[in-house]
Image (cartoon, rainbow, N blue to C red):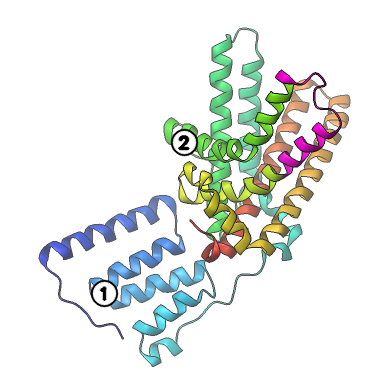
Amino acid sequence: MVIEVELSHEERAELIERSESLNERIATEGDSAETRIRLANVHLRLGEREDAIRSLQIALRLRPGTPAIVSKLRQICTEQEFAGLEIPKNIKPFWHNIPGLFKYPFSGSGIYLLIGGTVFATVVRFIVSLPTIFFYGSIFISVFLAGYLSAYFISVMRYSARGRNYPPDWPDITEIIDNVARPLILVSIPGLVAFLPAIAYLIYQAIFSEQFIAGGQSFILVGLVAIGGLYYPMALIASVMTDAALNSVNFVGVISSIIKVKKEYFIAELMLALFSGVSVAAYFTVAVIIGTVSGAIIAKFALQFVNIYFMMIYAHLLGLMYRQCESRIIP
């Protein structure tokens, strides 16, 4: 059992404010085990034991089988209370249901979200291609679309990390800064960090080498790209799940996390490679078949549909991996 400590008026007011802030975060960003654990600690300090137990039970449902949460519940519950609790089993490994990953974009109202996003992206790309759009205008619109798709990618990752097996709604398009600029930074910075050595080597060879990327030089480039591909998913997780792009530059933290979850990470990398291969095959199949029998607009719609479909799968897979390995991944 936990011994209650008498609080001053100022301390109690501060804790109540922190509790309200955490509840507001849950309401706006959705549940997470980390937020629920913090909220439980605040409830305990306020002497609200039953609220703390409820919050820890929710955390345990979000992160089943976590020893630290079970231990905390055992500390604050009586033996009778703890015996009556339902302790969820460990999370089923994400690689046990590969067909479910392919079905994910269609779960819930996913098909409507997928079609709606495809229509929106196709229309925006069509506008960019119009000759009446001036150069800087086309760049702005293209960046806007990239940022908006990045926002949805992040939303799917976070929903999946919270145990939700259906796609979230598309972000509010009116909140330009939060739903376009910031997500684009959160997704692009890890990619830049991961592939910067390959990009730098490519630029160097283009400027100073008489034989541009030939023989052993191409082998070095492939190696640098492979290293970037190995680093990028965890760097992306570090950026997105902490809402801080610079965490992707924390090489020690990212590499340590990869080592700690090497089995799950290796399987995730293989699955990402598999989905990438399938997506490329699907893309070119659709391009040939649809492009042959239909007009340009329908072909562009079909190709955009394939792009968003696999984008949702990639994000869902990374979110599931994070959910399974969260306690071992360094934030």
Residue 214 higher or lower than 195, as above or below: above
Residue 61 locus on image (x, y percent): 50, 70
Residue at which label 1 appears:
48
- Mark 1, secondary structure of its residue: loop
Q: Which residues are magenta?
A: 207-226
- The residue depicted at 80 percent of the width and 35 percent of the height is 283
Amino acid carrying mark 1 in the image: Glu
Residue 297 higher or lower than 275, as above or below: above
**Which is nearer the N-term, disc 1 or disc 2?**
1
* Number of the front mark, 1 or 2: 2
Q: Quadrant of residue 216?
A: top right
Q: Residues within 10 Å of mark 2 (few under 14, many from 20)?
A: some
Residue at which label 2 appears:
182
Residue 40 locus on image (x, y percent): 34, 69
Residue 54 locus on image (x, y percent): 38, 73
Q: Quadrant of residue 309?
A: top right
Amino acid carrying mark 2 in the image: Arg
User: Can residue 102 be seen in the rendering of this structure?
Assistant: no
Q: Residues within 10 Å of mark 1 (few under 14, many from 20)?
A: some
Residue 31 higher or lower than 47, as above or below: above
Q: Furthest-bottom residue in view? A: 80
Is residue 101 rendered to the left or right of residue 251? right
Q: Quadrant of residue 291?
A: top right
Considering the whole magenta stretch, tell me its main secondary structure.
Answer: helix
- The residue depicted at 11 percent of the width and 65 percent of the height is 9
Between residue 119 and residue 61, name the one nearer to us: 61
Is residue 244 rendered to the left or right of residue 52? right
Distance of label 1 from label 2 (alpha carbons): 37 Å
- The residue depicted at 87 percent of the width and 29 percent of the height is 288
Magenta region includes residue 2 = no
- Mark 2, secondary structure of its residue: helix
Please say if the residues under marks 1 and 2 sit with CB atoms less than 8 Å apart: no
